[in-house]
Amino acid sequence: MIETDLSAGIVYFAGKERERQILTPETVKTLFAADWQNGKAKLANMLACVTGLRAGEILALRAVDLGNDCLYVSHSFNPFDGLKSTKNGESRTVQVPFPFIMDALIDLARSNPHGQVADGYVFYSDMVRGKPLDEKVLLSDLRKALRKIGLSAAESKKYTVHGFRHFFTSYTKGKIDDRFLKMQTGHRTDKMLTHYSTHDIDGQAAAVQAAQIQIFGGLLPMERIGA
């Protein structure tokens, strides 16, 4: 809308991206067996671990997005833009073959204190109607839980909620067809899928669920989660 390109001549910074840190399966198992300060944060981090969902996609989940053993992911949330489309602008079905997690999500959605039903956020804010939990709570409680199980404060700072996306992709890649995995994670290209794994087709849901149960089932407490 303006005559002059103000960005002309600016050289883009191309520094090396810092490598993401992911937890070991043994640490993940200990982490989710521990008590967390905030049950919502524990459930959200666990969901990120077993599905590869982005934090914004988890916070954007509403009651209408909950299936029997899957999630219908079509939105993301951030405090600047609010509710918006996913990063690649596409909707997808994400498999969750763990009944106790789905039950916890349904119970949490029903406990929304703001009188919102179908369109209410699953991970709702206790204080503000029509908004989800602050993403900072997911991160701070993750790091508190890591310190509780023995990591130092400095070591715990190496890990983020987004790290579970790398954890999921790293341990799932090679166990199922890359086409199925991209449908689960929402990666558009093989290049991005490979980037995240460096550390509907017939049979897709069954293949993904079988891999999830095999890889992540032993890491979870397999009990009802109180949020």
Image (cartoon, rainbow, N blue to C red):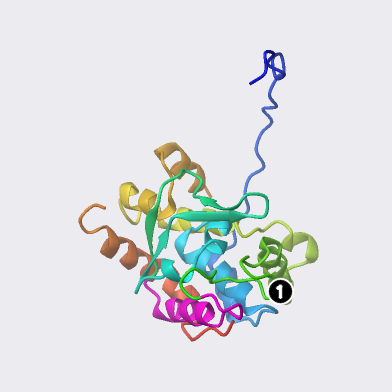
Q: Which residues are magenta?
A: 97-116
Of residues 161 and 104, the one drawn nearer to the viewer in this rendering: 104
Q: Is residue 200 visible?
A: yes
- When the figure is inspected, residue 186 is found, relative to residue 118, above or below; the finding is above
Q: Quadrant of the N terminus?
A: top right
- When the figure is inspected, residue 181 is found, relative to residue 124, above or below; the finding is above
Left or right side of 135 for 213? left
Q: Quadrant of residue 22?
A: bottom right
What residue is rendered at 55% in x and 59% in y?
Answer: 164
Of residues 113 and 38, the one drawn nearer to the viewer in this rendering: 113
For disc 1, the marked residue is 127
Circle 1: element type: loop
Q: Is residue 31 visible?
A: no
Q: Position of residue 176 (x, y in %)?
A: 32, 55
Q: Quadrant of residue 51?
A: bottom left
Left or right side of 29 for 148? right
Within 10 Å of the Cα at label 1, are there few (<14), some (14-19), or many (20+) other Cα atoms?
few
Q: Amino acid at mark 1?
A: Met
- By secondary structure, the bulk of the magenta-drawn segment is best described as helix
